[in-house]
Amino acid sequence: MEIKDFSYFLPDELIAQHPCNKRDQSRLLLLDKKKQKMADFFFFHLPELLQSGDVLVVNDSRVIPARLFGKKPTGGILEILLLNRKANKKDSETWEVILRPAKRLHENDVIILENKCEAKILARISDKKWLLEFFSPCGFESYLNSFGRVPLPPYIKRKKNAESNIDRERYQTIYAKNPGSIAAPTAGLHFSSDVLQTLHAKGIKIAPITLHVGYGTFMPIEVNEVEKHVLESEYYEISEDSSKIINNSKRVIAVGTTSARTLESASDENGHIEAKSGFTNLFIYPGYKFKRVNGLLTNFHLPESSLFLLVCAFAHTDFIKKAYQHAVENRYLFYSYGDCMLII
C-alpha cells in the first residue's frame, strides 16, 4: 500500500486551535460500519448511542509539562521536548529529548534554563534525539511542574514561548492519573463528569488502562510503502481489575487509538485480555484483523498518519474517507482540540 492513498483535503480553518467551551459540547459523528451509514450528534449524546453492558476502555495517562526553553552556549533560544526519562539520581535526571534548533550543539555543552536549572548534553542519539542530564536546586520534578509547559502539537498555534492556562487544564483528560505522556490521548478530552455519571447510571462501565503517548504520535510516515513504516515503542499497563471488566463484556469500545493499540497488543487470538505491562510498537493499518476492539471513539486525524491508517483499518478506507468528507462539508473541527467520531 502507498501512503499517498491515505490522504484527504482539509481546509486550514477546520484545524481546531482551541478547545470547545465545554468538553461535552463537541460534535460527534456516528458511523455504523455494518449499514455504512452516518449521523450527526453532540458528545453529550454518547450515553444514548451505547448499550447497557458496553465497556469504554479509556487511557488514563497524564500529559507531563514536557516543553522547556533554555539558552545555548551561544545565547540563542533553544526549545527542549522531553521524551523518555533514562535515569533518576539524587541531584539530577537524564532524559532523551528533542532539541530545536539543534545546530552548533556538541557533547558537554551546557544549556541554561530558568531558575538556576542547567542541562548538560551527554550525547547525540540520532538526527533528532539527544541525551541531556538536568540539574535543578529544587529537584527536576518540582522544576518541571513549575516551569515546564504543555507540549501542544505543532498544528496548534500559540504566541512564541507563551502558555495558556486553558491549555494546562484542557489538554488533559478529566480522568488522567498516571504521568508519562507527551501528547494527550485526545479522544478522552470530550468526557465531562456529567457524561461519566450518565454512562454509569446506564450500566456502561469504564475500564482504565495506561499507554504513555510518545513522540511517535507526531512523527509523519516518511516511507512510500505503508508496510515499511516502524512505530516507536510506548509503555503500557493493564490492571487485573480492568482486564476482568473487559473480558466479561460483550462489546468493547476503545476510547482513542492509544486504547485500541493497547488492547490489541495485550489480546490473544481469541480476544482475551491479559493483565500485563510492557512496550508496544504495534502498527495497525488496513488488512489488520481486530481481536478485541468492537467499537472506536476517536478524533479526526492527520492525513497520511499512523492514526488515520488505524481508523481506516477498523472501518474500511472508503467509508472513512466518506466520513471525513462529510465532516469537512459540515464544518466539523479536526485534530487534538477538534470533534470526534464513534464507530460501531
Image: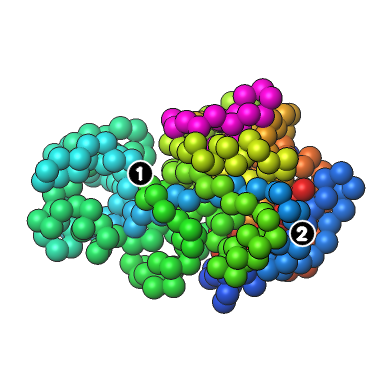
Among the 4 quarters of the image, the one containing residue 75: bottom left
Residue 305: give x, y in percent of width and height: 60, 43
Q: Which residue is mark 2?
A: 49
Name the one closer to the observer, 152 or 265.
Answer: 265
Say which amino acid is labelled 2.
Leu
For the point 48% across and 58% down, the residue is: 175
Does 218 sit left or right of 178 as displayed?
right
Inspect this view and state whether residue 100 appears. no
Relative to 329, residue 262 above or below: above
Whether the magenta-drawn stretch holds residue 272 is answered as: yes
Whether the magenta-drawn stretch holds residue 47 is answered as: no
Looking at the image, which residue sits at the far top?
269
Residue 119: give x, y in percent of width and height: 17, 48
For the point 76% across and 63% down, the residue is: 48
Relative to 297, residue 306 above or below: above
Does 188 sit left or right of 148 as displayed?
right
For the rendered model, the colour scheme is rainbow
Residue 41: give x, y in percent of width and height: 76, 66
Relative to 293, residue 256 above or below: below
Q: Earlier in the sequence, mark 2 or mark 1?
A: 2
Inspect this view and state whether residue 200 appears. yes
- The secondary structure type at the circle numbered 2 is helix
Among the 4 quarters of the image, the one containing residue 151: bottom left
**Pair 2/1: label in front:** 2
Residue 229: give x, y in percent of width and height: 57, 30
* Quadrant into which the N terminus falls: top right
Does 282 sit left or right of 291 as displayed?
left
Q: Tell me the CA gap for discs 2 and 1.
A: 37 Å
Q: Which residue is mark 1?
A: 83
For the point 87% across and 53% down, the residue is: 37
